[in-house]
Every structure is written in C-alpha cells, then in structure tokens.
Image (tube, rainbow, N blue to C red):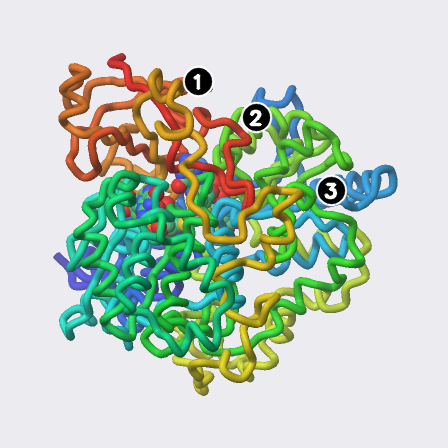
C-alpha cells in the first residue's frame, strides 16, 4: 500500500491527506454538558470525531451521543430548505420556498396580527436548545410581546423558584471544598457526565455522599447513604431530617438566630414529621433518615446538589424542594465555601466566573411596558420570580382565547411531546392562525407548521459558551451549513429587520451583540477567535462567601425564609402554604385511593438514559442500537404477578390512554413503580397525563408520579 493511502486509511491529519482537525463543542445535550470536539475534516466533510483533550469539562471524553455526531449532522431527516405547507395541517405536504419568501411571509403575518390583536398575540418559543435564547427573548420583547416561552417551564425554573423562595439568590454546590455532598435527585453518570470526575476525586479525598433517589443508579452506588424514597415524597423526607437536626440540636444556632425568618413555626411544623412517620410516607427506614440527617448536619461544610427536574416534576415539587433547601438554612451551609455558594450567572445558565450584560440585553422593554404574559394570572409567584412566560399554560390560552387570544407562534425546536397531554398541545397548534417551527430535523411537530425553517447544527456555525471551570470558547464553523440551513441567531436578527424593529444592536449581528453582552467581562470575540479550542478565563471573579452578612438575603424579609412571605401573600387567593408543607402527589394511594385501586402503579417518566436526550437521538443508528425499542422498567416481582417476562409487550394504561412498550425487568427501581423514558413517537408517555396535572405554584407537570395500570399486551 502506498504511504498516502495508509495515511488516508488511518485518517491521519497532514498535508498529504488534506485532513485537518478542527475544534468545536457538542451541543446535542445543551447547555450544562458541552463536551469538546476534535473533528477531522476532509474536503468539507467530517470524517472522524474525537473528544478534545484540552476541554476542562470533558477532558477528551465523549459519550455515545457525541460519538455519533456524524450520524446527527448528516442524518437524512435534516431540513435543507425553508418549506411552506400546501396541504392540510398534519398532511405533511410541503413545498420548498426561498428564505426571502419565508421570512417575508412570517414578518407580514406577525405585523398583521400585531395590528389586529396586539403584539401579545404572537408567541416566541424555544425548545430545549439554549444557545440563541437571549436573541429570541430580545426579539419577543422588542416586538412588544411578553410571550417569550421556553422548555424551562418544565426544567430548572421550579427548582430555581424553590431556592429563590428560601434563599433569595440560588446557590450551587461547591463540591471541591465540601466534606459532605447531599445529592438530592441527580444522576450525573447519565445526565451530566463531566460532573462525575470531580465527585469521584473529592470522594477519594474523603467526601461523604448521601444520595436521595428512588432508583439504584451509578450515582447512588457511590453514596455512603442511599435514601431510596418513593417518588414525590421528598418533602416528607426533608422535613424528617429537619426534625432530627432540630431536636438533636445539630443546627447552626448563630445562623438560625441571626439570619432566618420563621424558625419557630417551622420547628413546630416539623415535629409532625418524625422519622417513623416519614418512613410510612417515603418507604425509607427511620434509622437511615436519622443517619443521613446526622451525617449532613455533622460534616461541614456540606452542599446540596439538586437537579433541574425530578423533584419538581411533581404536583408538590416546589414545596418539596423548599423543604430540602431549608436544610441548608438550618445548618448554615448557604453561601459558604463547600456549601451552596452564590455566584453570578455569566451566560446561558452557567456560572462561569465573569459578569455580562445578558439580563439587560434581553430586556429592551421592561415588564411594566409589556402586556401580561401567558400564565401569569394562574401562577403569580412564577410571575414574580421567573423572567419568562409559563409554557405549560400556553395550550390552555390558545384554546380558550382568555385573557386574550394567541394567534401566532414561532418555535425554535418546538416539540409538542414535551407537554403533558401532548395531544392537547398538538390540537392547540392546529387551532393557531399561524405556526412556524425552526428545527434541524423534520420532526412530528414540524408537520403542523405553516412554515418550517431549517436550522444548522452547532458544528456549522459559531457560538459562545462558558464553563463553570472558568473556561470560555467561541466556536467557529467546522463545515458549511448543510443545504440552505442557517443558524438560529441570524434567522432571529434577520426576522427582526423584516419586522421593522428598529434595533441597531441586532442589525450589527450576532458577534457585535455578544461583544456588547460581554462588555463587563473584558472578553472580546476577536480575542476568543484566536483560541479555537477555547481558553481559560484570564481574570476570573473572586467569589466571596457569606455575602448575606453585608447585603442580607434577596427575600421580602431580607432573611433566609423557612416561612415564605412571598407565598403567604397568596394564601387566601391561591391556597399557597407559607411553610414548606408536605402534601402527597395529587394522584396517589394516599390522596386518591379509589383511583389507586384501579391504577395501582406509580408511573415515573423521563429518568435520563445515557444514549438519549429527549427526542434528539432516537433516530441515530448507534445510539438507537443501545436500546432499540421503547421499554418500561418494571420490578421483577411485579412482572411475575402479572405474568410478564423480559421483552414481553405490555400496555401502560392511565385514565387518559395507553401505550404499548417492551417490558424491561430490573431491580433498579422498586416494587410498585414503573419507569419509562419520554419523547418516543411510537410510545409517547406524555399522552398518558392530564394537561392540568401540575404543581399549582410553578405550573411544572407531575411527570414523575401519576397512576397507571399494567396489562400484558
Ligand atoms: N414525561 C416527561 N416529559 C418531559 C421530561 C421528563 O422528564 N419526563 N423532561 C422535561 C424536560 S426537563 C425538558 S428539558 C424537556 C425537553 O423538551 P424538548 O424541548 O422537547 O427537547 P428536545 O427533544 O431535545 O428538543 C426539541 C427540538 O429541538 C430541536 N433542536 C436541536 N438543536 C436545535 C437547534 O440548534 N436549533 C433549533 N431551532 N432546534 C434544535 C430538536 O431537533 C428537537 O426537535 O422535556 C420535558 N418533558
Ligand atoms: N443522557 C441525557 N442527559 C441529559 C438529558 C437527557 O435527556 N439525556 N436531559 C438533560 C436535562 S433537560 C435535564 S433536566 C437533566 C436531568 O438530570 P438528572 O436529574 O440528573 O437526571 P434524571 O435521570 O432525570 O433524574 C435523576 C434521578 O432522579 C430520580 N428521581 C425520579 N423521581 C424522583 C423523585 O421523586 N425524587 C427524587 N429524589 N429523585 C427522583 C431518578 O431515579 C433519577 O435517577 O439531564 C440533562 N442531561
Ligand atoms: Mo430539562
């Protein structure tokens, strides 16, 4: 074999082969996991994918999704041109149109609706993708619509609300400096792989770990104590831990006396939650609850690692997490090194160690200058604490037209299967006068759009990302955008222009906007471009601890609130309880015994599988081969009672409907609970939920505890 041929077969980057290695990041998961990519490119095509060693988050590793980048980027489902619907909605009949025609049609439609119904009748939605969000947010508000909506109405925000209610400002786990880590429902081994190594390293140095999870996960396997509770009973468990910490006088007297509000009432309330009572509710042995409380309160500093979703995917989610975060209040573990440390958000939900003007950027108008947002009459505390409209309420408002009609919607990666009662959301899309969806792929949701726009993937464009490891990257395109696909940010700025929004900053384009946002940090896009693989932050902010001792807490009382003065205001009107009160999930054996008799299993949906991220990687052969069919996890003893064997077809049935999936017999969970991943077209578990099965404080759907029965199909 000739030398060059050998080099080519080995995909060796060198002048002889014409193969170049270019840097990028993987944004198939987005935004906490953004692993570094080394992409081998020949003749404008990616021929090989590796992890980037210099990336401090992923350290050269890639998961199955990132390894399948070529299958993702070059998939035949990729949209290549703008499309216009020519048949009835859902028929799938589209014809290709030019970008000019597409964007002009959208702009004309939006302007007409604004004139006839007001700007609030046009809604702007972002699915799970995050990179373009500040641009979409600015577009909505500049247009005059308060209805910037995102997937974060099912993710992160409710956990953030719970923290804001207790602390004022949220604090993240400072694992590096901690002696005890209380992981309250997170499984980074599957969901956030770059966080695993820091935990394992700290454990080698003696970090104690408590893990609260209904399943035996790889994370739980690392724990000194695993509290395997019943889904949705987190509040009762946390209140019982508080009971032990208070009654055994393990709490931080100084902190509680000087900096907290409502301790007396809280102390009284937790008396009800003895470990024995909590054992009945949660299924966790009283002895273990005591051990965990003593370990967390006695091993300082200790931090709580929460998650964006599982605890708040319950009808009692915000209150449950308030009970959990109150433990940091009791022990003085808030805003201290090794505890839950407050850091400024830099960009796209990441505390990267620098300041930006991102908040100012998204608010060309203040909320006071805008009409009321979707859901704000329903969720008043959301309105006070969250900087966007509530998406879960969107289909209700489309259907009712109250308090005002929603006529048009543009989605950037809108997937109707994200919503509880996904069919209700799909029907709502059909009711709109005008619906546009922007996506990489021709998805089920695109079939209901009047216009579909093709977005390009992260390796075909640039984007700014930062890391908690004090590292920043501004990526550059590795290949040309496929077909006529374009990056979301330029679609947004182009649309702003055609809408006649007089926005000089937008007009200068993505990079100029980023420079404006980055101004307080001293970072410049030109400089970042010189470091294609990213660079360490030149001058990271020094984060002080105990900032509250000077500034107080950003709560209405100025103290850390065991009793929430913000919730108290809505006691009469909305029935919100000011204490972190425990109520059972709305549908449960305790609350609805008759329903539970017919539907005896708890259905818990969406625990992350390592090879899938929502609906994004089902279509990739490599990832799909790792779990080819939609399957539900069922405990072997439950399966046996029902005569179900491994890989049998079973039906999951709720009052709302049924789906057919394979049985996966496993002891990862517990008897009486069925686990099922979300997002499958052929077995959409969100079709089994009521649209209004949600937490009355946050509006977050109760994805992780509703009732079902199992039948052998
Ligand atoms: N039952 C149940 N339901 C759940 C959950 C659960 O645990 N259980 N989890 C909830 C949570 S936490 C979340 S975050 C949501 C996620 O909900 P979704 O937003 O539905 O998540 P995805 O399917 O990842 O992304 C939506 C679309 O974005 C497209 N997309 C990808 N990249 C881009 C891009 O760069 N630009 C554009 N324009 N589009 C892009 C994808 O192709 C996809 O069609 O689901 C929620 N739903
Ligand atoms: N591979 C992969 N990674 C992902 C995603 C993905 O879809 N795939 N999605 C991303 C997104 S949008 C999010 S929000 C994060 C979520 O990240 P994580 O929260 O870490 O992941 P999950 O698997 O959803 O939930 C973590 C654990 O919560 C447990 N759990 C379920 N119900 C309860 C409960 O009632 N109480 C308690 N205490 N624990 C419970 C589950 O058993 C699970 O092991 O993952 C992100 N990373
Ligand atoms: Mo999420």
Q: Is residue 543 left or right of residue 3?
A: right
Secondary structure under badge 2?
helix
Provide the residue designation for mark 3.
Answer: 122
**Looking at this view, is 659 or 47 the one in front?**
659
- Label number found at residue 655: 1
* Distance from the alpha carbon under mark 3 to that under mark 2: 19 Å
Q: Residue at x 27, y 29 (%)?
A: 632
Which mark lies nearer to you, 2 or 1? 1
Q: Are marks 2 and 1 in contact (CB under 8 Å)?
A: no
Quarter containing the N terminus: bottom left
Q: Secondary structure at mark 1?
A: loop
Is 476 situated left or right of 118 in this image? left
For the residue carrying disc 1, how many other residues have a C-alpha within 10 Å: few (<14), some (14-19), or many (20+)? Answer: some
Residue 573 horizontal side relative to residue 480, left or right: right
| Residue 215 sits above or below residue 590 on the image | below
Q: Is residue 553 above or below residue 583?
A: below
Q: What is the spatial separation of the Cα atoms under label 2 and label 1, in whole angstroms? A: 15 Å
3D distance between C-alphas at marks 1 and 3: 34 Å
Please report whichever mark, 1 or 3, sits nearer to the chain's N-terminal start: 3
Q: Residue at x 32, y 32 (%)?
A: 676
Residue toward you, 594 or 479: 594
In the foreground, 114 or 211: 211
Rendered image quadrant of residue 532? bottom left
- The residue to which callout 2 is attached is 424
């Amino acid at each position: 074999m000739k030398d060059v041929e050998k080099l080519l077969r080995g995909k060796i980057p060198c002048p002889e082969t014409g193969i170049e290695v270019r840097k990028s990041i993987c944004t198939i998961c987005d935004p906490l996991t953004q692993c570094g990519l080394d992409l081998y490119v020949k003749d404008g095509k990616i021929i090989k994918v590796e992890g980037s060693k210099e990336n401090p988050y992923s350290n050269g590793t890639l998961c199955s999704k990132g390894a399948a980048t070529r299958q993702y980027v070059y998939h035949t489902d990729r949209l290549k041109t703008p499309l216009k619907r020519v048949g009835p909605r859902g028929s799938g009949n589209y014809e290709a149109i030019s970008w000019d025609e597409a964007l002009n049609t959208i702009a004309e439609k939006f302007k007409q609706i604004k004139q006839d119904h007001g700007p609030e009748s046009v809604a702007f939605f972002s699915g799970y993708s995050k990179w373009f969000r500040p641009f979409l947010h600015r577009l909505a508000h500049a247009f005059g619509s308060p209805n910037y909506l995102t997937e974060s109405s099912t993710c992160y925000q409710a956990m953030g609300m719970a923290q804001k209610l207790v602390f004022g400002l949220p604090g993240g786990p400072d694992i590096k400096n901690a002696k005890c880590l209380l992981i309250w429902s997170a499984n980074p081994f599957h969901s956030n792989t770059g966080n695993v190594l820091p935990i394992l390293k700290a454990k080698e140095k003696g970090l104690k770990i408590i893990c609260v999870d209904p399943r035996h996960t790889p994370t739980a396997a690392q724990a000194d104590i695993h509290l395997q509770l019943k889904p949705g009973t987190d509040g009762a468990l946390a209140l019982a831990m508080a009971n032990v910490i208070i009654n055994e006088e393990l709490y931080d007297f100084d902190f509680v006396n000087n900096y907290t509000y409502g301790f007396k009432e809280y102390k009284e309330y937790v008396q009800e939650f003895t470990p024995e009572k909590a054992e009945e509710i949660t299924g966790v042995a009283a002895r273990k609850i005591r051990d965990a409380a003593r370990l967390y309160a006695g091993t300082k500093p200790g931090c709580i690692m929460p998650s964006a979703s599982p605890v708040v995917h319950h009808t009692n989610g915000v209150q449950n997490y308030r009970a959990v975060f109150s433990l940091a209040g009791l022990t003085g573990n808030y805003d201290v090194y090794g505890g839950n440390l407050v850091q400024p958000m830099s960009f796209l939900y990441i505390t990267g160690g620098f300041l930006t003007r991102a908040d100012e950027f998204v608010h060309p108008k203040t909320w006071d200058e805008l009409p009321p947002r979707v859901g704000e009459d329903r969720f008043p505390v959301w309105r006070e604490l969250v900087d966007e409209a509530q998406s879960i309420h969107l289909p209700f408002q489309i259907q009712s037209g109250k308090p005002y009609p929603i006529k048009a919607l543009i989605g950037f990666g809108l997937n109707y299967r994200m919503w509880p009662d996904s069919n209700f959301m799909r029907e709502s899309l059909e009711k709109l006068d005008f619906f546009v969806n922007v996506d990489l792929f021709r998805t089920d949701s695109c079939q209901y759009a009047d216009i579909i726009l093709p977005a390009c993937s992260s390796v075909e464009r640039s984007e700014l990302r930062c890391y908690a490891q004090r590292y920043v990257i501004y990526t550059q395109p590795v290949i040309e955008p496929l077909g006529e696909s374009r990056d979301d940010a330029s679609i947004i700025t182009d649309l702003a222009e055609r809408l006649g929004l007089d926005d000089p900053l937008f007009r200068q384009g993505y990079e100029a906007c980023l420079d404006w946002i980055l101004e307080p940090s001293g970072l410049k896009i030109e400089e970042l471009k010189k470091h294609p693989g990213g660079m360490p932050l030149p001058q990271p902010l020094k984060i002080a601890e105990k900032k509250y001792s000077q500034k107080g807490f950003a709560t209405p009382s100025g103290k850390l609130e065991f009793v929430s003065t913000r919730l108290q205001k809505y006691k009469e009107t909305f029935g919100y309880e000011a204490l972190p009160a425990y109520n059972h999930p709305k549908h449960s054996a305790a609350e609805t015994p008759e329903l539970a008799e017919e539907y005896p299993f708890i259905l818990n949906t969406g625990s992350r599988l390592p090879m899938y991220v929502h609906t994004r990687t089902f279509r990739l052969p490599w990832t799909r081969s790792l779990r080819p069919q939609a399957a539900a996890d069922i405990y072997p003893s439950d399966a046996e009672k029902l005569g179900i064997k491994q890989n049998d077809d079973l039906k999951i049935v709720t009052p709302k409907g049924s789906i057919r999936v394979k049985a996966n017999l496993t002891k990862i969970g517990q008897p009486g609970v069925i686990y099922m991943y979300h997002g499958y077209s052929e077995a959409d578990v969100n079709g089994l939920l009521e649209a209004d099965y949600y937490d009355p404080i946050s509006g977050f759907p109760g994805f992780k505890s509703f009732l079902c029965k199992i039948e052998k199909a």
